[in-house]
Amino acid sequence: MPRTRCLLAALLCCAPLCTALAQTADGPDGGIAAAPDAGTPDDEALRKELEKSLQQDARSTPAAQQTGSTTSTSSTTPPSTGGPQGTMARGTQSLNPDISAIFDGNAGYERRGVAYRNGDDPDLHGGPASRGSGFTAQEVELALSAIVDPYFRGDVFLTIPNLSGLEVEEAFATTTSLPYNLQAKVGSFRSAFGRQNGQHLHVQDFTRRPLLNAAFLGADGLRGPGAEVSWLAPLPFYVVLYGEAFSLAAPDIPPGPDSPVDPVASFGGGSATDLTYAAEAKYFVPVGEEWSVYGGFNFATGVSPGFLRANDAGTFPGAGRRSDLFGADLYVKWKPPNVVQGYTSVAWQTEAVWRRLGNAGGIGEEWDGGLYSQVVVQVARNWFIGVRGDVLGLPTSSVLGRTQRGSASLTWQGSEFARVRIYAETEHVGSGGGPFLPTATAGAVPSTSFATYLQVEYSIGAHGAHPF
């Protein structure tokens, strides 16, 4: 339409000029007589016709703009530059982040409260010597993600674990255009320490996280306000180096001498200037078309707040000890490149952590540690079977005893957005360690227990990718 209007306007403007040229060519005695300031009768008719066409074009243009989004654009005007309406639509879309929600519901039974419960584990309110059963909303996660500009990406993840209140699981900005293969992250986020610490609940292969997560990294994992710098090494295979610093706080101090005590935290003690530092090296090696190997080496150091119950002298044993974590993880997966004949895969994952606690707070230097190993087998298009074994107390210390756990899961995954899982575990709290053990292990009765859960999970909305 705009091209037609321009053509008609040009003809209208040129009409008098054409008339004058015609009169000059015909000579004084040729042509048709005309008024001094007007054209011929035919020119006047043409002028009126042109004006009528312009008026009709002006009336039809708004309607054409409103329906333009449902019709294809011409070959000379790409959709990305298709006028004010297209610009407005693109601007509105760019201001809306990807929004999603993930729900994990659980029903279960615990012969007694499990030891070393993580923050996103299902909480059925069982104690060290009392049963737990019933239903819980294990976690509700709300995620918002978007590209901010050519330099930053923003992510916010809010969670409600066991309906206990809204918390910020992660909220950070990530650079997207630093030179020399560098990338920076700032905000509150999960550390790259280990393999499962950086994973959200819905990425886990089991209903509960491994024992070592709560024992060494904290009930909520190693996460908090901080900054991270990573570098992708220019090598033939994938190698990334990370450096991190966090400002972590100690768990709340119980109000009385008989209140429950959580596991002794590795970090969060000392003064406000005592930061927690971490360094990781991650590598990925594809071994042929069927095998993949992913692993890492991890280190973290900070100050421990010590045993969270005061002694007779009013001090907290072990407060101010330097705590160092040394870890290694490995992930190996076999999956055939051609799945026409069926859907099968095998993934083996293992991780170990050792901790050195320094000499301070009335306790001498000591070491403790633990590990887990798991296998997940895909037996059909929608079915997965997993088994895992956990051991803590390799070796034991004054704050960590021997605990073993065996677990199994059967998962039906209808799609990438929904799954149902049956999970069962048996747990044994052994001897060793002390005298500063957490209540969940020091008062565990019976020493051997079991628990089982039915987990239902679904995801709605556009959810960004997480570390797998």
Image: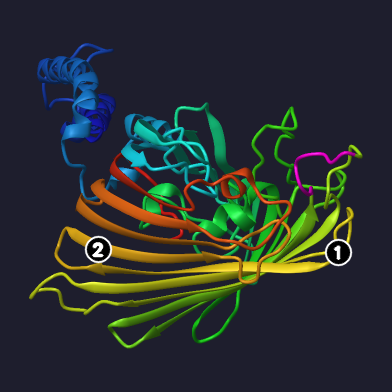
Along the viewing direction, whichever of 104 and 41 lies nearer the viewer: 104
Q: Position of residue 194 (x, y in %)?
A: 56, 65
Along the viewing direction, whichever of 215 and 434 lies nearer the viewer: 434
Q: Quadrant of residue 29?
A: top left
The amino acid on which the numbered mark 2 sits, given as a three-letter code, is Ile
**From where the camera sits, is residue 210 visible?**
no
Q: Residue at x 60, y 63 (%)?
A: 193
Can residue 374 be found in the magenta stretch? no
Give the side of residue 383 with respect to residue 311, left or right: left
Q: Circle 1 sits in a helix, a strand or a loop, which is it?
A: loop
Q: Residue furthest left?
A: 341
Q: Quadrant of residue 132?
A: top left
Along the viewing direction, whichever of 183 and 105 lies nearer the viewer: 105
Tell me the magenta residue range: 305-312
Q: Assess disc 2: are there few (<14), some (14-19) or many (≥20) residues with their C-alpha within 10 Å of its C-alpha.
A: many
Label 2 or label 1, whichever lies nearer to me, is 1
Q: Position of residue 172 (x, y in %)?
A: 60, 45
The residue identified by callout 2 is 385
Location of the C terminus by quadrant is bottom left
Q: Residue furthest front?
A: 446
Q: Main secondary structure of the magenta part?
A: loop
The residue identified by callout 1 is 364
Cα distance between the residues tagged 2 and 1 = 44 Å
